[in-house]
Amino acid sequence: MAMGALREASRRLASTRNPAIAIAVTATRPLLLTHSRGITHKLFIGGLSQFATEDSLSEAFAHYGQVLEATIVTDKMTSRSKGFGFVKFASEEEANKAREDMNGKVLNGRVIYVDIAKTKQDRSADVVPIARGPPKPIGDN
């Protein structure tokens, strides 16, 4: 339903007489479609208690629809919760309803923050080479 409305709005804007609007619409369309198809059914849950479990998180969000997966991010060294996690829903409508209703609610004694999860950034572009000793002189050897 949402995808049909998005396509219809894109067609109407693209068919306008103003070429600047048509170019802007065609340039942003892949981004909109990627966002609406990709990760909109996955929610970020922040402010979790250290005592929260994946089962309790799944149970809390199960009232809004079918929870496919509930994960809590933990520290690799201590295996303790980092205080945030993710809940994946079967549909976008269920995820949006859960986001609206659960944002600012108390879960295990802590107020939680719920938002749509963002995609992971590509960290390979941020890799900086490690310096190995002093720089080599430029010019004649």
Image: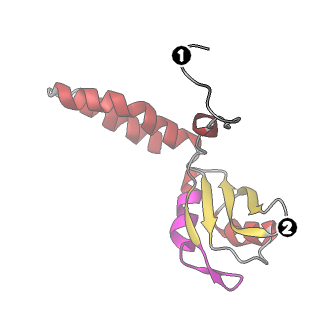
View extreme (left): residue: 17
Which span of residues is magenta-colored?
A: 95-112
Of circles 1 and 2, the one toward us is 1
- Give the secondary structure at mark 1: loop
Alpha carbon of mark 1 to alpha carbon of mark 2: how far?
Answer: 51 Å
Q: Mark 2 points at which residue?
A: 78
Work out whether 129 lies above or below 23: below
Placement of 23 over or under 48, stated as above or below: above
Mark closest to the chain's N terminus, 1 or 2: 2
- Residue 80 in percent (x, y) is at 81, 69
Q: Residue sitting at 77 percent across and 69 percent down?
A: 81
Instruction: State the residue at coordinates (58%, 58%).
Output: 95
Amino acid type, residue under disc 2 in the picture: Thr
Q: Which of 2 and 53 is in front in this view?
A: 53
Asked whether 102 falls inside the magenta stretch, the response is: yes
Question: Badge 1: how crowded within 10 Å, few (<14), some, or many (20+)?
Answer: few
**Residue 65 pos. (x, y %):** 66, 61
Q: Is residue 8 magenta?
A: no
Tell whether 41 sits left or right of 109. left
Relative to 77, residue 33 above or below: above
Rendered image: mark on residue 139: 1
**On the image, which quarter does residue 23 sit in?**
top left
Residue ID at (68%, 54%):
88
Residue found at x 69% / y 36%: 133
